[in-house]
Image (cartoon, rainbow, N blue to C red):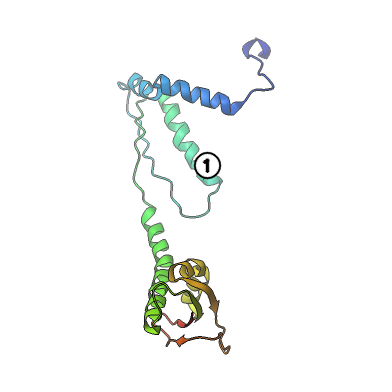
Amino acid sequence: MPAAARYTALSPHLSLPAVDKEILRFWREHDIFARSLAQTEDGAEWVCYEGPPTANGRPGVHHVEARVFKDVFPRYQTMRGFHVRRQAGWDCHGLPVEIAVEKELGLAREIVRLVQAARKEAGFAVTDRIRLFWSAAGATAEAMREHAEDIADTVLATEVTERVSGTAGGPHEWAGEETELGIRFWLTR
């Protein structure tokens, strides 16, 4: 049979997003997914435990590939007559991600705590806007640089400036000693 006889020609003005919406509407109105489960409930079970997506790196094509596998294989097995319930699995990546985030933000939170203590020691009012000068090294300096904007917002700093060793660091009303994190602050209103 010639190809032209098997397929209807598509309009050059066809909107695939509109077709997709129409198909989804039809599936919802006719409860197609539930019907596919009911139709295969006497079939052998085919199980695919699907873990949730994780935020452990930049999105990439491998994420799309994993989603396609988790969609195509259950559909295919359903078409073969297997009963496929689509049961979500468990998250085996979340805890390492949470720990990594906590390590990163934990240091920034600790810096905020130290700045707040310095504000109090300097006798500044809770509402005083401050200029914050700082000096640190290593992970503390990295956290300070990376989260400077968030730290500034939290401690009401209009300016956060790294003081390079050997420089005056600008005028200040209060100079602190080096803290347990190896960071030192100079504050002014």
Q: Position of residue 172 (x, y in %)?
A: 50, 86
Q: Residues within 10 Å of mark 1 (few under 14, many from 20)?
A: few
The residue drawn where x is 53% and y is 75% is 160
**Residue at x 50% of width, y 45% of height:** 63
**Percent of width and height locating residue 184:** 46, 83
In front: 77, or 106?
Answer: 106
Q: Position of residue 78 (x, y in %)?
A: 40, 25
Classify 90 as above or below 7: below
The foreground one among 1 and 187 is: 187
Tell me if residue 34 can be seen. Answer: yes
Q: Amino acid at mark 1?
A: Val
Q: Residue at x 48, y 42 (%)?
A: 66
- Where is residue 156 drawn, in percent x and y? 46, 71
Q: Is residue 80 visible?
A: no
Work out which residue is located at the far right of the displayed protein and give it. Answer: 12
Q: Quadrant of the N terminus?
A: top right
* Near-viewer residue (148 or 13): 148
Frontmost residue, 156 versus 84: 156
User: Residue 114's image quarter?
Assistant: bottom left
Residue at the spot of label 1: 64
Q: Is residue 40 above or below residue 141?
A: above
- Determine whether, in the image, residue 59 is placed left or right of residue 35: right
Count every numbered label the image shows and give the total. Answer: 1
